Amino acid sequence: MLRAIMEYQFMQYAIIASALAAVVSGVIGVIIVEKKLIMMTGGIAHTSYGGVGLGYLLGFEPILGAFIFSIMAALGIGFINNKVTGIKDVVTAIFWSLGMSLGILFIGLIPGYPPDVTSYLFGNILSVTTFNLILILVITLIVTSVIFMFYHDWQSHLFDPEFAKIRGKRTKFMENILLILIALTVVSLIRVVGIILVIALLSIPAATASLLTRKLHHRMILAVLFGLLFMWVGIIISYFTELSSGAVIVIFAFIVYILVWLVQKSMTENKKILKK
Amino acid sequence: MKMEIIKMDKISVKYGYIEALRDLDLVVNEGEYIGIVGPNGGGKSTLLKTILGLVKAYEGNVTFKGTTIKKSGLTIGYVPQITDLNRIFPITVQEVVLTAKIPAEKSWFHKYSKKDLNDVEDVLKKVGIHNISERQISDLSGGEFQKMLIARALAVNPNVLLLDEPTAMIDIKSQKQIYTLIKKLSKEMTIVLVTHDVKEITKQVDRLIYLEKNILAEGDPEEVYRYAYLRPVSVAHRARARSGGGE
């Protein structure tokens, strides 16, 4: 395996891309989990499929199409939520299904044999290109910088946005920035785990970390470490078994989450017994 | 004569098609301690949120010393309802109170100063929870959680304190502690308190208001209490008369 990493550029790219993806998904994933935005993130991810289809149809890089559609979906969902309260689920479902439908439609309109979109839907970290790698790097830098530069603002906004607003914070602007950061993260993860599995990588590392620590920044750090573990182990298994890397990463992450949950639960029970 | 510091003029608020406040007039004078009571859905929380600008009135306006809140020089502290917040959010008591010290602008790479930390320590002492400043909020009792929210509101150095059900969902001992604390604070600042606990606040507020979309009764606490709770038929009658429905 180590020899393969040294020898093959695609393996080196996979290792670097997964490390960057772990950082970006760990940091923003904690916010997504705390703010209960998982389904909305799923909506943004699936809407991006329309962009992938448009990219193939018009002959430009599909990931750029995914980028445009994700941002549009994030801002669209955010805008409608601000105008009408209580319909977040409905708006998410509409964008989700519309994006997928547009993707299918655009790909259907391509003359001749349709392109293979499997790697966009289910991810293939072993096929990351130099362009993909630069994109993931830039997105990771943007997302982590915005979160850490304004860490106290995010902390205040996540706990009590009304109080933040009273203190003069532009909370609607912050909501929109958060949605854009989520859209960017989704784009960076498409090559790694695919559109369908993006929400797993944005929720499982953060949820696993939440079982072990109750400090926000510790959760972010732990989520990054779990993300690294999930992806690197997933890549190793995928390399040797030739199974889909995205699927392997998510299944391994799920198993670890369950194990950590069981350990944490039994430790809590033991503590209760000792207290008695 | 006491100065008017908050004036709500013909305020009407709707959530979709549901009317929360109708044609409401209210004046808050400097140094007053006002209690607001009324049924669920009567618009008590909406009234506070309208003062704070969290809810927009579709009719009427709110002025502060005759001008905008910024120009008035007033600082408002707010204690929201405990049910509006995520009680298992990963944050400590000190971190929550420190959020009151984040500047509105230019907050990138913000670090709390020693003065901020000292101020927070002082307000935590004032409300009696300085010994649990490092504790995660998920470990707090209802009473401790409410005291933390009061500490956060005090950390902005307010002239006016708005409290929304500060004794909801907590035990009787903590309720008494919080009322004693609020009474003490009422000597330092103007207070508007929304609550269901009519008996308790009747004993301590300067003015009691019974709100059901509009002010149906206000004035001397004992009189309003008798009027609103011992003669409910009269209140219902007056509510219908105000809405033009008649008997």
Image (cartoon, rainbow, N blue to C red):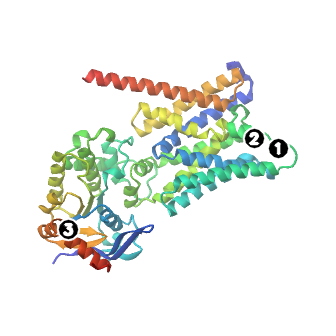
Q: Position of residue A77 (x, y in %)?
A: 57, 56
Q: Secondary structure at mark 1?
A: loop
Q: Is residue A258 left or right of residue B69?
A: right
Label 1 packing within 10 angstroms: few (<14), some (14-19), many (20+): few
Q: Secondary structure at mark 2?
A: loop
Q: Position of residue B73 (x, y in %)?
A: 30, 69
The amino acid pointed to by label 3 is Pro
The residues tagged by marks 1 and 3 sit, at their Cα atoms, a distance apart of 73 Å
Q: Secondary structure at mark 3?
A: helix
Q: Is residue A47 left or right of residue B175?
A: right
Mark 1 and 2 residues: CB-CB less than 8 Å, in contact?
yes
- Residue A117's disc is 2
Q: Which residue is more in the foreground, A204 or B127?
A: A204
* Placement of the C terminus of chain B among the 4 image quadrants: bottom left
Q: Position of residue A215 (x, y in %)?
A: 40, 37
Label 2 packing within 10 angstroms: few (<14), some (14-19), many (20+): some
Q: Are marks 1 and 3 on the same chain?
A: no
Residue of label 1:
A114
A188 relative to A175, above or below: above
Q: Which residue is more in the foreground, A109 or B90?
A: A109
- The answer to whether residue A222 is visible is yes
The amino acid pointed to by label 2 is Val
